[in-house]
Image (tube, rainbow, N blue to C red):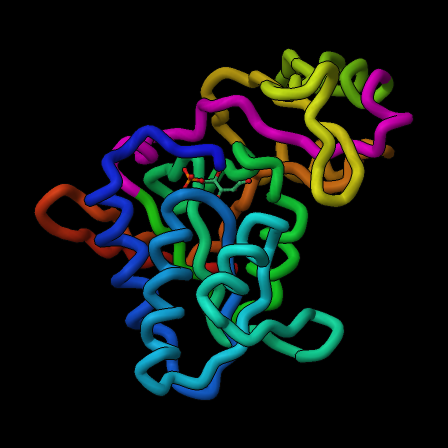
């Protein structure tokens, strides 16, 4: 599993606090990554104690973990809405915008977050930044990776794309959806909303990792506490 930079204790605090917000009888979106894993495990323990929920996983990883935790699963084909989606982030700006996709899961994560009444992000302080400035992960259909990379270089502001290479396989990372990943460096992103629209408009882009105006709250765990930042999602 990909792991973020923060301490496990900080991640655990954020994840477990988010799990406390899951209500009996609800449908919960199960995000991907090392921070959300703490929330999924806590939901599993609550189910052992009688909580009734159904989960919608956002990746192979979160599905497997949910199965291990005996969380009953459903899908967006079976339910019309998600009550609460819980997910991690690679970077969180002061405005509450996110960069996601460090684990190549942003496409299903965005689907589930967009279907949710409430979207809670779990993070540790290493994820916080005044502006978004990490590279933006973009899932592309395999035939399109060269032309999408060219279009990204031609954007204003221009991005510098790198095809994500697998670490224990020759060749590229292949996503859960059978696609490839471009990590695109834009420097400090001054207008995430415009960049998000530009990227969505490039043919061959399946989904990018900019989540603009989507988070309702960010739970930031630390080694000895927790800060809750609330936002008005669009
Ligand atoms: O594709 C992966 C997801 O967007 C993750 O939620 C994100 O990378 C954060 O993961 P972690 O909690 O392990 O830092």
In this view, the residue in front, 173 or 21, is 173
Residue that lies at the very extreme toward the right in this rendered image? 143
Q: Is residue 58 above or below residue 125?
A: below
Residue drawn at 40 percent across, 86 percent down: 24
Q: Is residue 113 above or below residue 50?
A: above
| Number of numbered callouts drawn | 0
Residue drawn at 46 percent across, 59 percent down: 233
Percent position of residue 9, x then y: 20, 44
Residue drawn at 71 percent across, 37 percent down: 175
Residue drawn at 39 percent across, 78 percent down: 47
| Residue 174 forms part of the magenta stretch | no
In this view, the residue in front, 71 or 110, is 71
Going by the image, does 156 lie left or right of 38?
A: right
Residue that lies at the very extreme toward the front in this rendered image? 68
Q: Is residue 128 above or below residue 123?
A: above
In this view, the residue in front, 221 or 231, is 221
Q: Quadrant of residue 186?
A: top right
Q: Is residue 59 above or below residue 46?
A: above
Going by the image, does 192 lie left or right of 146?
A: left
| Residue 140 forms part of the magenta stretch | yes
Going by the image, does 163 lie left or right of 212?
A: right
Q: Does residue 232 show up?
A: no
Percent position of residue 82, x then y: 56, 73
Q: Does residue 2 show up?
A: yes
Percent position of residue 197, x then y: 69, 39
Percent position of residue 215, x then y: 44, 55
Going by the image, does 119 lie left or right of 12?
A: right
In this view, the residue in front, 48 or 141, is 48
Q: Quadrant of residue 192?
A: top right
What is the span of residues highlighted in magenta in the rendered image? 124-146
């Amino acid at each position: 599993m990909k792991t973020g930079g923060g301490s496990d204790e900080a991640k655990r605090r954020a994840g477990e606090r988010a799990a406390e917000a899951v209500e009996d009888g609800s449908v919960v979106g199960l995000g991907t990554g090392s921070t959300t894993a703490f929330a999924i495990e806590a939901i599993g323990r609550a189910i052992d104690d009688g909580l009734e929920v159904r989960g919608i996983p956002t990746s192979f990883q979160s599905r497997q973990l949910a199965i291990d935790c005996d969380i009953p699963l459903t899908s967006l084909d079976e339910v019309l809405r998600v009550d609460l989606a819980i997910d991690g982030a690679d970077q969180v700006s002061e405005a509450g915008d996110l960069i996601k996709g460090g684990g190549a899961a942003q496409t299903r994560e965005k689907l589930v977050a967009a279907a949710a009444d409430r979207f809670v992000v779990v993070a540790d302080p290493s994820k916080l930044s005044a502006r978004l400035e990490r590279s933006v992960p973009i899932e592309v259909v395999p035939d399109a990776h060269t032309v999408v990379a060219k279009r990204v270089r031609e954007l204003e502001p221009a991005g510098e794309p790198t095809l994500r290479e697998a670490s224990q396989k020759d060749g590229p990372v292949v996503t859960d959806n059978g696609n490839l990943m471009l990590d695109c460096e834009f420097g400090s992103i001054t207008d995430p909303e415009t960049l998000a629209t530009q990227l969505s408009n490039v043919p061959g882009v399946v989904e990018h990792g900019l989540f603009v105006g989507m988070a309702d709250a960010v739970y930031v765990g630390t080694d000895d506490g927790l800060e809750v930042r609330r936002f008005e999602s669009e």
